Image (tube, rainbow, N blue to C red):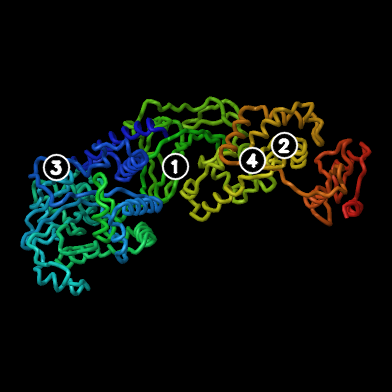
Amino acid sequence: MTIDQAQSRIEQLRKTINHHRYLYHVLDTQEISDAALDSLKKELFDLEQQYPELITSDSPTQRVGGKPLKAFKKVAHEAQMLSFNDAFSEDDMRDWAQRNENYLSSTSSFSSLTSHLPPLFYGELKIDGFAIELVYENGTLVQASTRGDGFIGEDVTQNIKTVEAIPLTILSPEEARDNAKKLNLNITTFNFNVPRIVVRGEVFLTKKEFERINKEQEAKGQKVFANPRNIAAGSVRQLDAKVIASRKLDSYQYALVTDLGQTTHEEEHLLLKAFGFKTNPHNKPLTSLEDVFAFRNYWDTHREKIDYEIDGIVVMTNDNATWNALGIVGKAPRGGIAYKFSPVEATTVVEDIKVQIGRTGTLTPVAVMRPVTVGGVTISHATLHNADQIERLGLRIGDTVVISRAGDVIPQITEVLTDMRTGKEKAFVMPTHCPADGSPVVRDGVAYRCSNKKCGARNSENIRHFVSRSAFDIRGLGPKIIDRFIDEGLISDVADIFTLTEGDIKTMEGFGEKSAENIIREVSEHKKIPLARFIYSLGIIHIGEETSRALVNALPIPNTQFQISDVIEEFQKLTIETLQEIPDVGPSVANSIHEWFNDKHNIELLHRLEDLGVTVFIEQKVAGTKLAGKTFVLTGTLETMSRDEAKEKIRELGGETAESVSKKTSYVVVGADPGSKAKKAEELGVTILNEQAFMKLIG
């Protein structure tokens, strides 16, 4: 991506994010999910990290939230209320830690900051609620305010007083000191007699209360709420405190703004608990990034066991001196980050729409997308089902889309973000002729089909042949799996096999993480293939294993690894007459080879395979000379060894094998129940060897 392209994309992202953030923070409504908005914000953050010269002061990454509603009195915060940047993967977290380490190493205080004892981090469940600041004077709650723009919030004291989880008065200094001692804090290091204490926390709605409120809404014939967070936010901003009181909000406190002598974030939580604040019992210190990963992964799979919504964890540098030294970048602290769970929705770009041919000849459009992680898996394909679905979505190639995956459901494109368009997007039109065989396409209800009824089955056979043991030998792709992939729209030709990701596979019913991993590993390990087997894999009419070897021997290519484009070039040089000079190649075979390598669709397929990393080479084997210059054809069943073993032995001794008998054939080896090749040998006067004579010759 050039800097001009990056700037254009950044401007589109900022405009879209600002629109949705205004709906979310100011109007308490939303048009897209939190996960989709997070995905847009993450893309913007990553682009600005890559091109820091494009960061502007009005970027969504440089500010916290929306404007305070005018209906409430505005109040200034004790200190700026910040929000966290997002991370979605272990790599993101490692990058965050490395950025902090690099920043600290450039400061003069780095050496003193690295001397603090473990734990290095503090982990908190990231509750999907509403942030508030609470001010206590002489133990009494005097002010509660919303985040607002981070500097100035809205005074919602009367509303917050209705939340029973928030104390109207906190414990006395003496009581707090006694509690701190029970919590194993060194009470001599803290000042419990501070008259003004400022804390921060989260107001949220439990799942049970969310269900109760929505049932009431339905009974009244009113619109139900989309999620608990919207109710919490809307309740806190209600002018009538009776409304919020009826909704039974809950709250945890997680930050102590006032300096009581705490040196770690862990101590802040313990001090909050000592003063009688409700703190989350699941929050904990973490000694390493590996502990962070384990903490996040545990709650990703156990979040249904708690009665409130969480969308990740917050990871903070535990040591306060380090936290302060790291400071702020934009409007987010360097020392903390929101490590999100795998979103069930994310945004990505549709880079192409391909048409896949099913086994029944049905044409299915499939979106080829910029790889994106949704629901814990990275995917790059999504079926669009049919042309009507594309029309309903209003989808164009190049569009930014929302892709969803709830539970184990196959990922689906659910929305097109039309405000992200640049004008370069392209409309998609179903082809009038089948991409596989060129036959006319006919419409059958909502489906489009190839008019050649054998097309789909033949395509399946071609792919099965391509992965067979004598070709690419991709053993994880059996016939049933290939047919399933074709029916699901994952593959339409042999090149599509090498575009699959684990996420594309394990989202399908019946496939798990291990089976997906095994298939992708098998595919990856078989990208390098001997040229003879590669030619055989292409399924060219009349070309068997022996003819493929004969063709390789005739090509003037060095015995090293080379590119598929080199093979194309050499075959296109060969005339039909030249091809017929090769052993085992007659007029029909020569015509078939010449036509195949001069068909533009076949050449496009070969170039795709090359672009996807498939390479070919000529096997180098030290051969004997005993059978040099001799060509063998085998027919019937041998008792001493299999025909494949016999062919291998012939080649080891310098001989060649062929599939058909001609005047150029030196010997025809005949086993039990021979076919017509033995009769052909008699007619042409070719020497016939029984198994005993053959074993004597090679022995």
Of the 4 image quadrants, the one containing the C terminus is bottom right
Q: Nearer the viewer, mark 3 or mark 4?
A: 3
Q: Which mark is residue 557?
A: 2
Query: Badge 3: few (under 14), some or many (20 or more) residues near its Cα, within 10 Å?
Result: many
Percent position (x, y) of residue 503?
47, 48
Query: Badge 4: few (under 14), some or many (20 or more) residues near its Cα, within 10 Å?
Result: some
The amino acid pointed to by label 3 is Pro
Q: Which mark is residue 68?
A: 3
The amino acid pointed to by label 1 is Pro
Q: Nearer the viewer, mark 2 or mark 1?
A: 2
Tell me the CA gap for discs 4 and 2: 30 Å
Q: Nearer the viewer, mark 4 or mark 1?
A: 1
Quadrant of the image occupied by residue 495: top right
* 320 lies above or below 519: below
Residue identifier under label 1: 371
Q: Is residue 57 left or right of residue 236?
A: right
Q: Earlier in the sequence, mark 4 or mark 1?
A: 1
Element type at mark 1: strand
Q: What residue do we see at 90% from left, 51% from top?
A: 697
Q: Earlier in the sequence, mark 2 or mark 1?
A: 1
